[in-house]
Amino acid sequence: MQSGDEVFSQAELEEWNEQLKEMGQHYQALMQELLERMAPDAAADSIQADMREAFQAGAESLMRNPQLLWQTQARLIQDQYQLWQHGLQALNGNLGEPLVAPPKNDRRFKDEAWQQEPFYRAILQQYLLFSGAVEELVEQLDGLPEKQKRNLAFYARQMVNAMAPTNFVTTNPEVMRRTLETKGQNLIEGLAQLRRDLANSADGLNVAMTDRSAFEIGRNIAVTPGYVVYENELIQLIQYTPTTDTVFKTPLLIVPPWINKYYILDLRQDNSLVKWLVDQGHTVFLISWRNPGPAQRDLSWADYMQMGPIAAMEAIEQACGEKSVNLLSYCIGGTLTASTVAYLTSTRRGRKVKSVTYMATLQDFRDPGELGVLLSEPILQGIEARMEQDGYLDGRSMAYTFNLLRENDLFWSFYVSNYLKGENPAPFDLLYWNTDGTNLPAGTHGWYLRHMYLENRLVEPGGIELDGVKIDLRKISTPSYFVSTREDHIAKWNSTYYGALLPKGPVTFVLGGSGHIAGIVNPPARNKYGYWTNGELPDDHETWLAGAEFHEGSWWPHWQQWMTAGGYADADKMVPARQPGEGELKLLEEAPGRYVRMTIPEVLGEVPAKPE
């Protein structure tokens, strides 16, 4: 790294001058593009209004408690004095122990300069003292409603993390070194990448997370062999090719979420839940949801039920001759599945489902976590107004929202590497999937957010009506297996657990380690994370955990044992393996099919659709 007193040669100065000109051109173009995007938006305006209201309420609470205000100010003054003393010692060559240090798992400050160079060391400690004071201050505020305090904590955290010194060129030692080494070429490449990412964003900024050219659906992801055997406006139904000579008599239908695409369950052969299920002897069918656009604006939750699981079950009967199935569902696909099983129960068709499994599924939305911050009544009204105008919620907006739930890992880390360091994202299949989003129809998504998240009506007997039928989860007698994950920030287990208390039929609840994806997509060969089981279902989730037994490895074999022990997959009644196309359904195309290949820009006509 060049020190400040080094003199550049004439050639170097000319090179810097050219780089600065190019940076200026990129910057001007970027500002123009940003101005063109600054049209009024009801959803964004409602979020900004909620943010202002939260900070105003926090300020009023603080003014009502002058002692807390005085204590906070006194502490900041004391911290500044100690930091000044540490700075003087560091300038004299005595670094000593820092006044405050970042958590060990905070990857933003791994560079040695944060600990070894007095300038960066002082900046880091100043930031940590400030961020810690903000967090503690919000925590100690009194007189705020619980939800408003949660919102204030979320918004304050977003602002504090946005102000981190790592996010700026001159206060990030890695970026400064790179800038001097490349004479600013990293910033030029970063600005170009920022413009590309902005062009592929809806609301907010969807940072590039991976090298998208490294992956192709059906070539190196979503490659488990099979065929599309049925399709309608909303789904393609895939039947996978068996790998065993005999299979369980009852077919297995997977109902994945339609927020993102199904192949999170079939990324690679070594971690594919789909392949593992086929290898265990299941006849596996899977719903591949359409990526909807304005034409699907009026699709309702009942339409998703009828054209999704119910239509798939009818198609499976044509393919296999079996009148009942086992259901395996995930996330919002599980919420739909619970609705479907309750609907079938109320219409006296409950026997069509032999067993039902819910992976990381909310049925009781009592604690939606930080997603609830962005789903207050005013914000929801803004989202509804936007969807009424467009006919859909752009999946890129949804992705941006989810990324802000883990902003340092899923936004700012890529912001620094892409735009400040000028690095190209590395190939990573999971992040490819994370950026391969889906739109959400206005008629379905607005209803879901209001009836489930905001009003929590699914848990109420008759609280939800589908096609004229009031449903009640408490009437479900189908054997149920619930698996949640302990660190899930999307479907928090302290809410998913209470869904397991609703059915009247036999229920098994399992808690996996890790989070919403890694804890579910956890193949046995990795022997990671572990899981907890408890034969009892007490009224409180913490009581359940206190009495639970921990097991090493994946929960997948435990689920398979539950299936066979209950006879839902009956090892005594195996049948010859069923090949796709052997029944009444014709082969339409090879898996993974064209629905899963539809990208948001193609659906919205922003780029030409790929030829079929």
Image: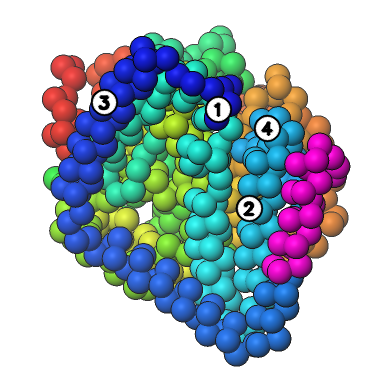
Identity, as a three-letter code, of the amino acid under mark 3? Glu
Numbered disc 3: secondary structure: helix
CA gap, disc 2 and disc 1: 28 Å
Q: Position of residue 602 (x, y in %)?
A: 19, 30
Q: Position of residue 68 (x, y in %)?
A: 69, 81
CA gap, disc 3 and disc 4: 30 Å
Q: Quadrant of residue 126?
A: bottom right
Question: Position of 96 compared to 248: left or right?
Answer: right
Q: Earlier in the sequence, mark 3 or mark 1?
A: 1
The dot on residue 22 is: 3
What residue is shown at x 36% (from left), y 39% (from top)?
206
What residue sits right under mark 4 in the picture?
Answer: 113
**Vertical relation: 410 (above or below) 521:** below
Q: Quadrant of residue 280?
A: top right
Nearer to me, 588 or 256: 256
CA gap, disc 2 and disc 3: 32 Å
Nearer to me, 487 or 351: 487
The dot on residue 5 is: 1
Identity, as a three-letter code, of the amino acid under mark 2? Tyr
The dot on residue 345 is: none
**Vertical relation: 403 (above or below) 427:** below
Q: Earlier in the sequence, mark 2 or mark 1?
A: 1
The dot on residue 127 is: 2
Numbered disc 1: secondary structure: loop
Name the quarter where the N terminus is drawn.
Answer: top right
Q: Residues within 10 Å of mark 4 (few under 14, many from 20)?
A: some
Q: In the rendered structure, are the residues bearing label 1 and label 4 in contact, judged by CB atoms less than 8 Å apart? A: no
Q: Earlier in the sequence, mark 1 or mark 4?
A: 1
